[in-house]
Image: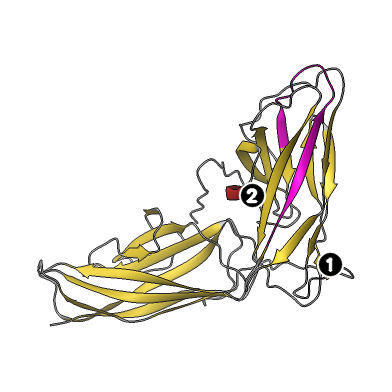
Amino acid sequence: MRTLMRAGVVALAAGSVVLGGGVAAQAAPAGKISVSVNRLILDPGAPYGHTGSVQVLVKNTTAEPYNGGIILTEPIAGTFDWVNQVGAEACGLAETADHRDIQSCSLSSAVQPGTTSVITLAFKSTAKPQPYAQIAPELGTVEVAGKTASFGAVFRSTKGKTTNPRPYVQDTVAKLSVTATDATLTRQEDGTFAGHSTVTLHSDGDAKQHDLNFDVATPNTLDPWPRITPEGPCVGGSTDFPVPADYNTEGCLIFSRIAEGETQTYDVTVTAPAEATAGAQAPGIVRFTLNGGPGQTDSANIANFGVTIAG
């Protein structure tokens, strides 16, 4: 299956803890480099998911600037929010044995002697907000110059409480469902045909994900490369997408996550050449999967849609 990552992040083999480039080895100078971090509180969204952040303090009491690397391990799989991370960059990516992400990064700037640098780590969880607090079973960690600090993660309840938390259990399989409306292609001004299918994606789970993969297949009586909106970079379809041999396939990376309980809508534009034969065509096929996350145990994430070329 195709696995795509955002620019600037290197995807390594699942389960690997070999950390990639972006961190230059630097022996800690005489003196002390220390690191500390606060607890992560994940606040419920309105109405989906959770967000939160922690501040990492890197203190340098040596006589030399420290410009070594920082190694970050998330407490909950797939919750790093790289877009809003500040102070750490050029990160390589690996995984723990339980599929939590590990970032191996460079500091954005050196920690000067006698100063403390602040690094902000942002987090985004797709878990459904609950009327009770929850606590993650694993700790996140931050390692700098051989020193490690750990931090826990608590989901704030919809009532604003963090006390008496229940254990948080993350889904280990995707729970997506997809529907697609039929497309009727009508004649355009240039003589070709075009029509639309509305694809609706829903999630009933909070399994790990970095982004979404979208695959679409259409019969060879239509033009290849349907257009999806909102759009993302598209390549050939995933190798595990089960479609007939005479279909054209396309796979796109959607730079978005879907939260538990959320529904998203996409528009797929299907076209056909001017000489296409009018009437019912073989159906189109669409599929969503979690990029960077587990697979699905059923076929609810796949849908067919009828295609008719108007005469």
Q: Nearer the viewer, residue 16 or 81?
A: 81
Q: Is residue 41 above or below residue 90?
A: below
Q: Is residue 58 magenta?
A: yes
Q: Which mark is residue 82?
A: none
Q: Residue at x 77, y 59 (%)?
A: 41
Magenta region, residue range: 51-70
Looking at the picture, which amino acid does disc 1 mark?
Thr
Q: Which mark is residue 14?
A: 2
Q: Is residue 59 above or below residue 297?
A: above
* Residue 261 horizontal side relative to residue 161, left or right: left
The residue carrying mark 1 is: 162
Looking at the picture, which amino acid does disc 2 mark?
Ala
Question: Visible in this render: residue 72?
Answer: yes
Q: Residue at x 70, y 31 (%)?
A: 69
Q: In terms of secondary structure, where does tag 2 sit?
A: loop
* Residue 154 horizontal side relative to residue 288, left or right: right
* Residue 190 horizontal side relative to residue 253, left or right: left
Q: Is residue 250 magenta?
A: no
Classed neighbour count for the residue bearing mark 1: other residues with Cα under 10 Å, few (<14), some (14–19), many (≥20): some
